[in-house]
Image (tube, helix red, strand yellow):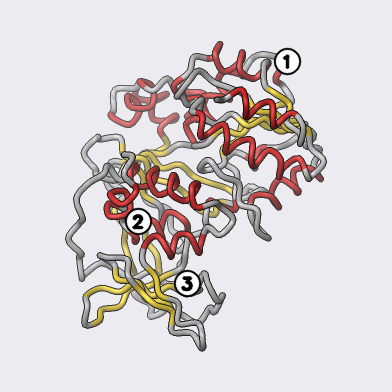
Amino acid sequence: MNNLSEAIDALDIEYWLDREGIQYRKTTGSHGVQLNVKTCPVCGGSKWKVYLNAETGLGNCFHGDCQAKFNKWKFICAELKNLSKKDVARHIQEVSQETGWRPKKEVNHAQESVFKDTRFFMPSMIDIAETVKQQGAGFASAKYLLDRGISLESIEYFKLGDCTNGYFQYRKPDGNIGYQDYSGRIIIPIFDINGKTVTFQGRDYTGMSPKRYLFPPGLNATGTLFYNGWNFDGHDQIVIGEGVFDCIAIRQAFRGNSAFAKILAVASFGKHISLSSGGQIDYLRKLCEKGLRVCTFMWDGETEALKDAAKYALEVAKLGLTVRIAVLPKDKDPNECTPSEIIEAFWEAVAINKISVIKFLLSLR
């Protein structure tokens, strides 16, 4: 999907807001369903003065003298102000691919609104690892995970659940209950640095949903977290994959080898590191206080991903960390690599600083 205008047109702005954890609620106006965003990414006003059309993404900020006008591109660029326009374009393409590059959906005027004061109710689910131990691995979610090479030990370690038929339930300020269907999805719980459950993801395992992933509205944005970072205890290194299944693959490759005993696999929820106050850079700063000394980026082997890694490696190095970039086989994610490929890439990772990064980037040409 190389055509940016097509990617922008395909992008579901409501899905994007949910994915990024941006607070909004729905209203109905003369031009259909409007997404009322709490905070304007241009002026910073946080009094619910931004309105985006749910279907077109066109909108305005009505806060004071701001009067910013938005389309999908302008709004996302404003929200991701730390990224270059090129990085934003690639981000939009990746998100559009997540949703299956499907035609525009028909707007459902009956869908529930999303509000600030969401109460956290996890969807009803079964413990996959425990069920496998008791009944065997003959059910759909277990087959899906095992077929992807995810071990029973990993399923148990990451506390993966199966929502066979259930919903995310959240309470709105008016006291009514909202629902988001998670049936047929792997529930991936996500914890903050202290081990408190703050959000989750739902990965479709049926192959029937146009959305591979669902993100619960109104909960903590993953852009402030690192997946599996809550298990940092007695470690002095981390290896950063892009997504949940990359993190799992890296951990499985390292597990059982004493050379990796103090190395923790984590994931950044995308090929970027949020650098704003309270973002992922502050999360890494907290890990430094707990003993982190070395950080290795292990995003995919695509040239653009390696360039992104180099960019953020320099930012992370400002924390006083030794930062490295592991180069995987071309166009492969960790979850597409063999354990030996992951281990080889780790040992051959390139240390990045202001001088070595120039040579590294030249080597990618």
Q: Specify which label sits upstream in the sequence, 1 or 3.
A: 3
- Could you tell me which secondary element the residue under label 3 belongs to? loop
In this view, the residue farthest toward the bottom is: 64
**Most foreground residue, 205 or 74:** 74
On screen, residue 250 versus residue 288, left or right, reads left
Q: Where's residue 130, x and y in %?
A: 44, 30
Q: Where's residue 313, x and y in %?
A: 68, 38
In this view, the residue farthest toward the top is: 340
**Most foreground residue, 90 or 245:** 90
Q: Where's residue 121, x and y in %?
A: 43, 58
Q: What residue does disc 2 label?
A: 15
| Residue 116, numbered circle | 3
- Could you tell me which secondary element the residue under label 2 belongs to? helix
Q: What residue type is labelled 1?
A: Ala
Q: Specify which label sits upstream in the sequence, 2 or 3.
A: 2
> Is the N terminus in the top left, top right, bottom left or bottom right quadrant?
top left
Give the residue at x 36% y 44%: 213
Badge 2 local density, few (<14 within 10 Å), some, or many (20+)?
Answer: some
Q: What residue type is labelled 2?
A: Tyr
| Residue 259, numbered circle | 1
On screen, residue 73 versus residue 267, left or right, reads left
